[in-house]
Image (cartoon, helix red, strand yellow):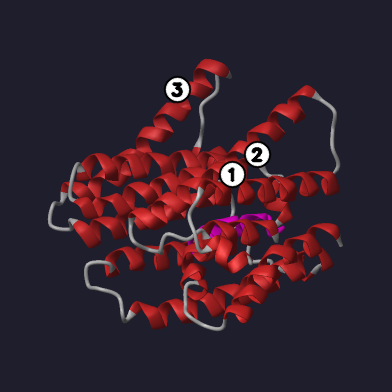
Amino acid sequence: MLSTFFSKSKPINFIVVALYMLLLLIIAHYKQGFLFESTYIIMTIGKVFLYILPMLMLNFIAQKNDLITKGTYTILLYAFLTGILPNSLTSFNLLLSNIFVLLAVTNILHLRNEKQIKAKIFNASICIGIASLAYFWSIGFILLVFLGVLSFDPKNYRNWIIPVIGLCTVYVFANCFTLLTYDAFYSFTTYSDPISFSFENYGTKDQLFSVGTLSICVLFFSFIYLIKFKRKTAKLKPVLRIIIAYLIVAIAVAVCAPEKNAAELIFIATPLSIIGSTYLEMHFYQFAKEINIWVFVLIPFTVLLF
């Protein structure tokens, strides 16, 4: 039974999920159309790495910070939530940006250890800055760095300045690169993207099901998570607040996206997979849980194949 299988954390679980994700990625590229060119093949191999690696990072974050039990429901949900967003699986920039945002969140959550706080704040800010080079509006996740400072070490005023220094550092190095490579200055207008509040594309046949399914998951999983939040220990609540804020900022980034094709919703998948794990870890009828998991496994194929 799948519910029993994913309630454990063994190497075979990660291999199965990785193969499942690889299959989703292949179908997404097949649907888009393969190009038998060396550049395209290299980029596709890079996408495989950028897509599967966050799954391992996500499991590490969730277990290291006591956000889940030792099962692998989180990575299954991550595969499901990204699988219903096929356009995100073919976007190198979004996959790259997503992995650097996740690296930043890893550093932010490690602030709870109260060791090398300034270095972790700087590292998180650098990661957000690099993520914004790939996808500008991921810069909004810098708010999570400030929330981390507020939650774990707000009295040291230097901590509030470090995120700005981190972003400026990335911008300076980006200018050094463009000046050396293209003999051109990396202006802010080139760096930034406009805001668009047009959601017309979400009404198309290809996007409506993906956006609708993700919206239902956000509402349902968040409702369960907030109920469980009250029962958590005071020590764990700052971490949980950061995960909730992660989801809120991810939604805001998607709202601000200049071009909406549902690919920008990939940022929502990471925090939502952690939040959704709370639901699957609840004790309810085994048959009902089994049905839920089979639905999660099969829904991406309906999006990708039809």
Left or right of 40 on screen, residue 279: left
Secondary structure beneath label 3: helix
User: Label 3, on which residue?
Assistant: 176
Q: Is residue 136 above or below residue 220?
A: above
Residue stretch in magenta: 258-271
Quadrant for the N terminus, please. bottom right
Q: Which amino acid does label 1 sit on?
A: Ile
Residue 33 or residue 231, whichever sits in front: 231
Count of numbered marks? 3
Counting from the top left corner in percent of width and height, residue 241 is at 34, 68
Residue 252 seen in this snapshot: no
Left or right of 190 on screen, residue 61: left
Secondary structure beneath label 2: helix
Q: In 3D space, how far apart are the residues under numbered discs 2 and 1 (Cα atoms)?
A: 6 Å
Residue 24 counted in the magenta span: no
Counting from the top left corner in percent of width and height, residue 126 is at 38, 39
Q: Which mark is residue 48?
A: 2
Left or right of 191 on screen, residue 31: right
Counting from the top left corner in percent of width and height, residue 183 is at 55, 18
Quadrant for the C terminus, please. bottom right
Mark 2 touches mark 1? (CB < 8 Å) = yes
Q: What residue type is labelled 3?
A: Cys
Residue 73 seen in this snapshot: yes
User: Label 1, on which residue?
Assistant: 52
Q: Which residue is drawn at 56% across and 17% down?
A: 181
Residue 12 or residue 303, whichever sits in front: 12
Q: Which of the two discs, 3 and 1, labels the residue nearer the N terminus?
A: 1
Q: Which secondary structure dominates the residues rendered in magenta?
A: helix
